[in-house]
């Protein structure tokens, strides 16, 4: 048994949401110097994610695929931001916004539209 790698337990939807929030905050930090609308969008995502954080939805298995997508899209946007690849950052942010919108709607906040 000693040679086996420990299996990583799957993350919960809440853990994935927390990871997405942390990435979005990191992306937004100082982004206004490049584009104020981008920073405003990220701040809005963080605010909405904070509002739905801790809700029952994130304790359920259906939350995992939706929030995993948000983690993935936030990681891509963060990487592009860190490398200052602004040509690809805009489309990556649009993808993150769409994924975040999906998470918000699945969490029961229908009618909330991100800008």
Image: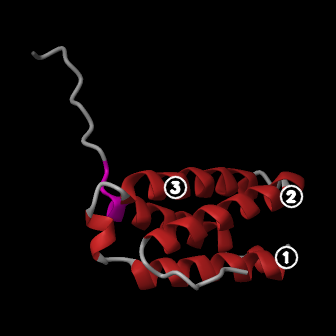
Alpha carbon distance from label 2 to label 3: 20 Å
Question: Disc 1, disc 3: CB below 8 Å?
Answer: no
Residue identifier under label 1: 35
**In this view of the protein, which residue sits in the foreground, 80 or 92?**
92
Residue identifier under label 2: 86
| Circle 3 crowding by C-alpha within 10 Å: few under 14, some 14–19, many from 20 | many
| Circle 1 crowding by C-alpha within 10 Å: few under 14, some 14–19, many from 20 | few
In the image, taking residue 114 as reference, residue 1 lies left or right, namely: left
Question: Image point 35% across, 56% down: which residue?
Answer: 62
In the image, taking residue 113 as reference, residue 11 lies left or right, namely: left
Q: Choose top left, top right, bottom left or bottom right for residue 26.
A: bottom right
Instruction: Look at the image and tell me in which quarter the N terminus lies.
Output: top left
Question: Image point 42% across, 73% down: which residue?
Answer: 107
Q: Choose top left, top right, bottom left or bottom right for residue 14.
A: bottom left
Q: Residues in magenta? A: 11-15
The kind of secondary structure element at disc 3 is: helix
- Number of numbered markers: 3
* Label located before the other in sequence (1 or 3): 1
43 drawn magenta: no
The kind of secondary structure element at disc 1 is: loop
Residue most extreme to the right: 87
Question: Disc 1, disc 2: CB below 8 Å?
Answer: yes
Location of residue 24 in the rendering, given as x and y in whole percent from the top left corner: 58, 68
* Label located before the other in sequence (1 or 2): 1
Residue identifier under label 3: 71
Question: Image point 31% across, 77% down: which residue?
Answer: 54
* Label located before the other in sequence (2 or 3): 3
**In this view of the protein, which residue sits in the foreground, 104 or 23?**
104
Q: Nearer the viewer, mark 1 or mark 3?
A: 3
- Magenta segment's dominant SS is helix
Instruction: Look at the image and tell me in which quarter the C terminus lies.
Output: bottom right
């Amino acid at each position: 048994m000693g040679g086996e790698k420990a299996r990583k337990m799957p993350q919960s939807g809440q853990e994935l949401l927390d990871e997405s929030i942390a990435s979005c905050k990191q992306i937004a930090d100082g982004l206004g110097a490049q584009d104020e609308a981008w920073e405003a969008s990220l701040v809005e995502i963080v605010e909405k994610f904070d509002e739905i954080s801790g809700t029952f939805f994130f304790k359920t298995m259906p939350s995992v695929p939706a929030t995993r997508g948000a983690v993935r899209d936030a990681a891509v946007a963060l990487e592009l931001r860190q490398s200052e690849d602004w040509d690809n950052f805009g489309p990556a942010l649009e993808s993150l916004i769409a994924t975040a919108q999906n998470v918000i709607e699945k969490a029961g906040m229908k009618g909330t539209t991100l800008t």
